[in-house]
Image (cartoon, grey):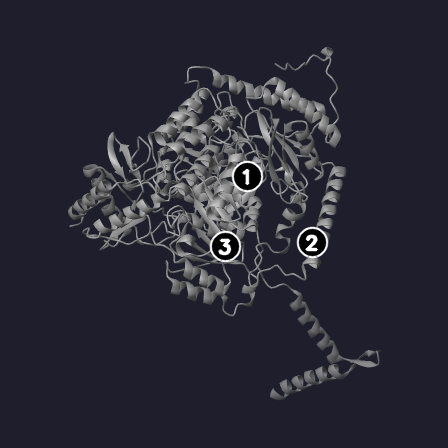
Amino acid sequence: MASAVMNTTSAALGWFSSAFDAPLARAVVFGVHIDGHLVVEVLLIAVILFQLSRKSYKPPKKPLSEKEIDDLCEEWVPEPLHPPITEEMEVQPATLESAAGPHTIIDGKEVVNFASANYLGLVGHEKIIDSCVGSLEKYGVGSCGPRGFYGTIDVHLDCETRIAKFLGTPDSILYSYGISTIFSVIPAFCKKGDIIVADEGVNWAVQNGLHLSRSTVVYFKHNDMASLESTLEKTTKGNRRAEKLRRYIVIEAVYQNSGQVAPLDQIVRLKEKYRFRLIMDESNSFGVLGNSGRGLAEHYGVPIEKVDIITAGMGNALATDGGFCTGSVRVVDHQRLSSSGYVFSASLPPYLASAAISAVDHLEENPAILASLRNNISLLWKVLSDVPGLTISSDPLSPIVFLKLKKSTGSIKSDMQLLDKITDRVLKDDSVFIVTSKRSNLDKCRLPIGIRMFISAGHSEADILKAAESLKRVAALVLS
Amino acid sequence: MVRLPYLTALTTLFSYGLLFAFGQLRDLFRKILDLPKSKKVQGYAPICLGLEDFYTRRLYLRIQDCFGRPIASAPDAWIDVVERYSNDNNKTLQRTSNTTKCLNLGSYNYLGFAAADEYCTPRVIESLKQYSPGTCSVRVDGGTTKLHTELEELVARFVGKPAAILFGMGYVTNSAIIPALMGKGGLIISDSLNHNSIVNGAKGSGATVRVFQHNAPSHLEEVLREQIAEGQPRTHRPWKKIVVIVEGIYSMEGELCKLPEIIAVCKKYKAYTYLDEAHSIGAIGKTGRGVCELLGVDPADVDIMMGTFTKSFGSCGGYIAASKEIVQYLKHTCPAHLYATSMSPPAVQQVISAIKVILGEDGSNRGAQKLAQIRDNSNFFRSELQKMGFEVLGDDDSPVMPIMLYNPAKIPAFSRECLKQNVAVVTVAFPATPLLLARARICISASHSREDLIKGLEVISKVGDLVGIKYFPVEPEKTYADGNLKKLE
């Protein structure tokens, strides 16, 4: 039995080996004998090639059928356009019934107004109103067109030359709205790939401009020169490409969110060391700082050419509306075609431009109003130094006096409620109009909120003492 | 849409190619000549690198005198254009004190409120003396006056929505509202020819932006279906909300948007609609209420209506009209409301008076007269231009009519010749329009009288012959036997 199996196996093996070695049909191809094993090898190679050439298994992509798309559209439910309205959203601001000067009328009562940024007291000034009346009768109210299409009126050109002459720069360009100035200037100069070093306390308009410019933005600690230096060092060290990129530092002269004043002399030194260009927003310092009101550069004695781009809104010290940007001729000319808020928008109403010209004229002729503004600020600092529960956290030079809570309650919402209680009672009991700093939820700034008081050169000593008295009394009541 | 004949396309491309070649040649010479003295400040990269401002330096500066012409009077039907001269081949322009009186076919003065008006101006001067030109504060601090609340109610009533909110500038309205309503996870579908302010607002919001073909509700439906089925990019989660943004009148085309069809599509797919009526509010519709009234759409069907006061009301600023809750929410979060100086009180009073005139609440029928006048003027002007053989875009009843020029050389030729004959027109080229489709844009006003229009037509016809832009055959004079005689009165 075993020997029979052995015999058949050896016979089969013998047959196989002879088949391997047997010349196949006596074929000679290219001088090579075709043996049996060649056939198997060729078959093997063919099988390998066949497997390699087949695509790996992927389930086939079926596009959605019309019915499936219909079903998806049916069951999709959008969110409502607005979130549910909470109680704090229903609060209405106070309605004024007269001009927003140092004294104004709210609900029939006369109140002392610390909520308008009327730094030079020019609201209600007769010379400015007269020039506006003349302008209204000649040019009407609106300018009915963008600057490129018959919206350029000669008062615009006069206003631009007047401001440039006042500041001592070669040229300036006028914008039709205060906050659109800075968020049109930044994207006009900073493109994708450029480097911007900005202060973390800049206001929303600057943040929007930085976002629209698509550049790389690095923030440094609020008004901290050591942090600025280390950030500049980090962004330029070892970066060969940094030589070819445009680099900017963006700051504000007097910060809207905190009342701090930027140390311009140190910043200019740093910018020259690391070769950055400087963009400075002077909305709250134009017409306020400096011996003749020419801004932060005059205050620190820095030549104005060292600051590359200066922008300012005219809605504060100059008591009109609109904004301007000034710098070298190259800087200003570039904006006339590539700044979107200038090219695609109607120009400033002509009467506001003539109001700006008369305001600048008035400031140049009477530099004494700056002295009275400074006296008012120092008086307020003196009488507010001992308010219970609140401390002054702004710079002694800034016309925005910022009071924040000594001990925060922990959440921004309850801080806000406490501060609102204080300001409401101050208005109701003592007829002094002050406001808290409101923050939009789109704003990325994380600085603490507080009570903001805008000092004006038109406030009298009695006004300031009255406000301080009232604040001390109410703060003691509410915060104890 | 515009049909571009092949021959015109070829000649236009050839002209641009020639200008480009010459520009590059001049740049080359400038580089060679500047090599010895390197003006670049060491270490600072130049403000514009290489080809970024090539168009400005080599093409725009040659025809700079056609743009930005200063005027020395109110932008009314006749204006005083200030003459300028140049000593260095148009690189800089100097003002003179001479002016020429020209017919104004370029300003956005649809209802004629641009100049001093007998009802509006005394009230504006009174409010100026009471409230002074600026409020120096933001709306939530001390910037809300009685005038602002009055205007918000009036605008809401005029447009037909429950509530409205005001802003001091039309551009800022779009750029600051869209980010407040949409955020990451939302989808914005906007028309391909939307204005720069809408594009900026959409970019600034952080939402995904998709574009649909201009005025094509079928393509909008396709895009909506595709986007809802796919969901957010990469994660494929469903979208939080979808907003479709369209304009009432497109300022470079002069055509109305197909509002009823677009609203129907949006309602079917539960998308919100945002209508920008910058050019159409006050100018079209039987009582001036804009494109909704003209096309028979109920204002309640449009979720958010935006408009500006610059064009028809002769003032400045913008508004948003929507439901009470949305306006309440916007007053709490919108950055333009919380951080921007409030609208100047005399400008607010101008809009209040203008709306009262339009509604007839000032005790006269001047409003109805103005509306009828602008409608007649626009239709007359457009039909006459078409009869002369010009290629005019835009729908009937729209006061904006672009005339196609195409070739870059015809832009300054048309503009300068018209100015020599005392007609001031506006010519638009790249980048406001596509490169090959340069045009001259006429804006009709209710303060143009019939004689003004006839003079304008004569001058344009003469210049058109000279420059060669009558692309269509001239229509033969219709005889009485034809029957359909169009009454021009």
Secondary structure category for the residue under label 3: helix
Residue displayed at 46% across by 45% down: A166
- To which residue does mark 2 refer? B27
Most distant residue in the top direction: B481
Place of residue A282 in the rendered image (x, y in percent of width and height, measured from the top left): 42, 49
Say if A420 sits above or below A236 in the image.
above
Residue B14 drawn above or below residue B446:
below
What type is the residue that disc 2 sits on?
A: Asp
Q: Are marks 3 and 2 on the same chain?
A: no
Task: Report crowding for label 1: few under 14, some 14 to 19, many 20 or more residues within 10 A (C-alpha).
Answer: some
Amino acid residing under circle 1: Asn
Q: Residue at x 51, y 35 (%)?
A: A155
In the image, what residue type sits under mark 3? Glu
Please name the residue that numbered disc 1 is placed on: B194
Q: Nearer the viewer, mark 3 or mark 2?
A: 3
Residue B395: % across, % down: 60, 27
User: Do tags 2 and 1 sit on the same chain?
Assistant: yes
Q: Nearer the viewer, residue A139 or A413?
A: A139
Q: Give the quadrant of residue A66.
A: top right
Of B205 and B336, which appears nearest the observer? B336
Of the 4 image quadrants, the one containing the N terminus of chain B is top right
Kindly check if marks 3 and 1 are in contact, taking CB atoms under 8 A apart as contact: no
Residue occupied by mark 3: A305
* Mark sitting earlier along the chain (2/1): 2
How crowded is the residue under tag 3: few (<14 C-alpha within 10 Å), some, or many (20+)?
few
- Whether labels 3 and 1 share one chain: no
Q: Nearer the viewer, mark 3 or mark 1?
A: 3
* Residue B96: percent from left, percent from top: 60, 35
Task: For mark 3, name the chain.
Answer: A
Relative to A45, A397 lies left or right: left
Is residue B12 at least partly visible in the picture? yes
Left or right? Give the position of B263 relative to A34: left
